[in-house]
Image (tube, helix red, strand yellow):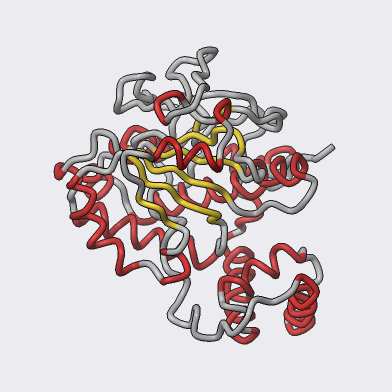
Amino acid sequence: MVFEFVTHHGDHQHKNEQHELSDEEKKQQAEILRESLGSLGNDLSYTQLAQFLEANSWNQEHAKHQLESTLIWRQEKKVDFCPVATTKNGLPLLVSVRGFKYIEDGNIQSNKKLSESAIRILNYLGGDCFHKFDKEGHPILIDRTGYHQAKEIGNDVTGEEIKHFQVACNEFLNRVIMVEASEKAGKPIHKETIIFDCTHMGLWQFHMNGLFKLKQVADYVQSYYPETLCRLFVVNAPSAFLVMWKIVRPWLDPKTLDKVQILGKDYKDVLLKYIDSESLPTFLGGSCSCSHLQGGCVPSVNEGRIPFLVKTEDNEKIASVYNSDIMLEAKTNPDYIKVVSS
């Protein structure tokens, strides 16, 4: 989950921006886009339309092209039937969670409903957690970037497997986390605040196959999930990060780079400007410890805070993140694909 929210949206961004549109002008542009899509646009919300317009600097032609491609992709790949974990359906998590009601606090862990590929990927990731909300109501994703096993991701995970995994994570974000964030804020929320904690990062993670695979997946995902980033903070970045940043930076467009803040020693003060102390882990300068769960606020198998996930014969060797019976059940059981807001 490292780079999926910070890749470029296309070379056309920024070129067509001439002035900041008013809220009314944005609504008008969204309706123009809806009408141009014909029947494809009937079920789309203003927020969805605005995301694609914003990603394309409010250029109608480019937004329509990207949105049409996304809708066709979702239909062909049956993305709407991708299962997402909720408190009601009890599916195992693909990312740890703290501080939500539609999904109980919990860690990633061994489970016979997961596929073998999902378990393998989760054991290679440094640790991610949706950890409460920032002061503006955006959900917070904290990524233990310094513990990612880049070599193993590059050599032992196929592109198809990691694409399935990332799409499942994005669907969980949109259909569970963002639904609750919007309800809690009393307004549409479709962006998140991300913190990359680079503690323990070193040149041992400088693995081109792993980095390139993440970029391929990031470009693929960003094509279909534009404008989900509010801001990104990079903290505890060692000199090794600067080496990798030189590779990553050309992938980013100016609009996205504006949302990235690489913080220095004063990072705790900066984070607390945007996040309440009780919503920020103690290791990042806040007061939250999440002592009620093993691993604390952002558990990591590669830091040794929670056990590695164990594979058994129940975990099928398929690209999807859940076993085939779960994928089949999701086609007919609405509880597997959404939450019902109150």
Relative to 42, is 197 above or below? above
Q: Nearer the viewer, residue 297 or 68?
A: 297
Judged left or right of residue 66, residue 286 is left
Residue at image coords 39%, 43%: 196
Return the x and y of residue 325 as percentages of the image width and height: 58, 37
Asked whether the viewer can see residue 324, the reply is no
Judged left or right of residue 78, residue 42 is right
Q: Nearer the viewer, residue 118 or 254?
A: 254
Relative to 314, is 15 above or below? below
Return the x and y of residue 108 as percentages of the image width and height: 47, 28
For this orientation, the residue located farthest to the top is 292
Judged left or right of residue 172, residue 299 is left
Q: How many marks?
A: 0
Return the x and y of residue 165 as percentages of the image width and height: 46, 47
Q: Nearer the viewer, residue 190 or 90?
A: 190
Q: Quadrant of the C terminus?
A: top right
Relative to 213, is 68 above or below? below
Residue at image coords 42%, 69%: 8
Return the x and y of residue 110 as percentages of the image width and height: 44, 24
Residue at image coords 59%, 38%: 326
For this orientation, the residue located farthest to the left is 203
Judged left or right of residue 281, residue 133 is right
Q: Nearer the viewer, residue 313 or 80?
A: 80
Asked whether the viewer can see residue 334, the reply is yes
Q: Quadrant of residue 58?
A: bottom right
Residue at image coords 55%, 65%: 224
